Image: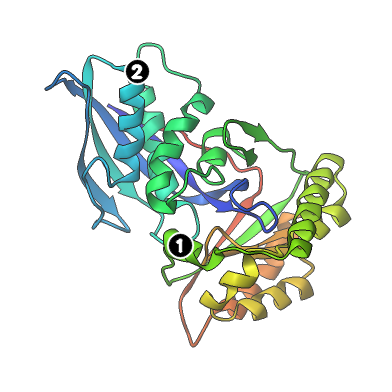
Amino acid sequence: MIKAYSPGTVGNLGCGFDLLGHCIDGVGDTVCATKVPKAEKQARVFLEKITGVVTDLPVETSLNTATRAVQALLDETKPDFDVLLTLDKGIPLGSGMGGSAASATAALVATNALFNQPMKQTDLYPFALAGESIASASAVGDNVGPQLLGGLTLATASQLIALPTPAGLTAVILHPKICIETATARKCLQPPFPLADITAQQAALAQLLIGLYTTDYALISQGLKDYLIEPRREHMIPQFRAFKQMADSCGALGSGLSGAGPSVFAWFKTKDQAVLASERLRQSIGHEGAEVDLLISSVSAGGAHILS
């Protein structure tokens, strides 16, 4: 039996819709994978038990991100055993912190370790995309990519690219305890998008990437903007504008939605700045006494890994 852990993530990062993401310390999913005798000609995966903050998930192979991802791996590798999974959910569903992706990634990392010759972790990417597609209705890598590679990642359709992060760069992540399903949030994004907004988004992505490579905080700040997605989704998160204004007043480099929301993030140059601002940010996003979880994490936090 192999146990693996995958952290949560902040996806999109404003200008990088479906492309950019980074891992989060302090929240994640854990999966145990066990070899069992193969019952049929084709190797299969079975989900035996779900525990944690969410337990009422489908266990059918085609409907669960963990089993869907592992089945894709087994179809490719054709091992002489079946795989039995147990899943411990640490990330709430519909939180905007890569919960569905974390289940898929942890399951893949655990299952991969059962093989005599495991793949490189980044080679699991297409199988993770197969699992993530259940939740997002699209094979996008802004969550599974950083989970497999660690840190801040550019996830294209076919490859994962590690991005540099200035020393000390820290994220504050706030999770208002409401649920927004990714597939539902994507319905807000029907085209057309104005050409001027597309151009502004491209400029923001370019500035963020250049800023990261040159440690130019002014460029990073200019890049942490979203002209396409955030304006269409912000109505789903109470007090979102108040949070953005508070982040600016606290000296954040930038802020925005984490994934599809409702979680939000703000980047700071240092951990000390992030800690100092965190409670004010939490209060700004709270709505009529609603409970809000707070996480503070290095933007370069590590990815999925074997626990035992």
Q: Position of residue 16 (x, y in %)?
A: 67, 51
Quadrant in which the N terminus is drawn: top left
> Going by the picture, which residue comes out furthest to the front?
192
Whether residue 308 is visible, yes or no, is no
Residue 77 numbered mark, or none:
2
Image height of 191 relative to 51, above or below: below
Q: Residue 306 lies in what quarter of the image?
A: top left
**Residue at left 38%, top 59%?**
93
**Residue at left 55%, top 39%?**
145
Q: Secondary structure at mark 2?
A: helix
Q: CA distance from mark 2 to mark 1?
A: 33 Å
Quadrant in which the C terminus is drawn: top left
Q: How many marks?
A: 2
Local crowd at mark 1 within 10 Å, few (<14), some, or many (≥20)? Answer: many
Q: Secondary structure at mark 1?
A: loop
Image height of 270 relative to 214, above or below: below
- Residue denoted by label 1: 95
Q: Amino acid at mark 2?
A: Thr
Q: Could you tell whether 172 is left or right of 39 in the image?
A: right
> Going by the picture, which residue comes out furthest to the bottom?
288
Q: Nearer the viewer, residue 229 or 290?
A: 229
Q: Position of residue 66 (x, y in %)?
A: 33, 40
Q: Nearer the viewer, residue 224 or 171?
A: 224
